[in-house]
Image (cartoon, rainbow, N blue to C red):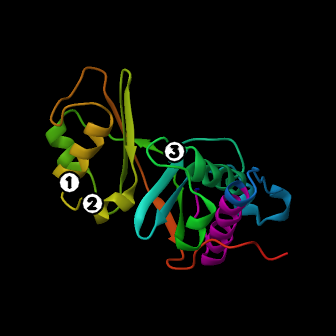
Amino acid sequence: MTEPLTDEELDILVAVAERSVWEVVAHHRPWRPVADGYPPALRAPGAAFVSLHRDGRLAGCIGVLTTDVPLVVTVADRASAAAVNDPRFRPVDPLDLPRLDVEVSVLTPSVPLPVESYAELLSTVRPGVDGITVHAGRHRATMLPTVWNDLIAPADFIAAVWRKAGLTPGDWPRGIEVQRYRTQTHGHSGRGVHAPAE
């Protein structure tokens, strides 16, 4: 995503994610939209995460940070993966669908953060704005900007990224790389997931 998407384009992506979840949960089959039928911004390559919440609790979240796949296809693919392939949660079943909220986060390209210490990172990160990716050897993790809703202080947010990567908060391993990105996040709370209209 280079230019912000419109509300209408974001609505389309949420509908695509909901249909993808419906197809894989209700019919045990993946669904891949034909990109040519969508607005140009959704046909362009785009990275995204799809988050599922069951009764307000996270039930799955899977995405990609970079891709050459059309955004609308990325969203459909990540939605089905979040529903049935997130190893942290049990797969969504048909009884969950009316209680499920689907949220799509479209990512800007990641850019390196030119920081040289953990303390400098804490003073540079933008609360409520930045998603953060850390990469140090075999240690890698990312945290979406939506997590700032729960971890408001930079120290808490960055510590959570470090722990997710298997690093000790405060450590600054040799060769560490930190990047940041922004997202546009959209969903419809309380709507549930239902059979798509034909």
Q: In front of the other: label 1 or label 3? A: 3
- Which quadrant of the structure image shows residue 118? top left
Q: Secondary structure at mark 1?
A: helix
Q: How many marks?
A: 3
Separation of marks 3 and 2 at Cα, in angstroms = 27 Å
For the record, the magenta segment spans 2-23
Residue at position x 25%, y 30% from top? 167
Q: Residues within 10 Å of mark 1 (few under 14, many from 20)?
A: some
Q: CA distance from mark 1 to mark 2?
A: 6 Å
Q: Is residue 30 above or below residue 95?
A: above
Q: Position of residue 171 (x, y in %)?
A: 17, 30
The majority secondary structure of the magenta stretch comes to helix
In the rendered view, tell whether residue 198 sits above or below residue 167: below
- Circle 2 sits in a helix, a strand or a loop, which is it? loop
Which quarter of the rendered picture does the N terminus lie within? bottom right
Q: Residues within 10 Å of mark 2 (few under 14, many from 20)?
A: some
Taking the image as drawn, is residue 47 in sight?
A: no
* Residue picked out by circle 1: 154
Label 3 packing within 10 angstroms: few (<14), some (14-19), many (20+): some
Residue 81: x %, y % from top left:
60, 47
Residue lying at 20% horizontally and 54% vertically, measured from the top left: 154
| Left or right for 75, reference 153 | right
Residue 86 image label? 3
Tag 2: residue type?
A: Pro
Q: Amino acid at mark 1?
A: Pro
Give the structural element (helix, strand or loop) at label 3: loop
- Judged by depth in the image, the label closer to the viewer, 3 or 2, is 3
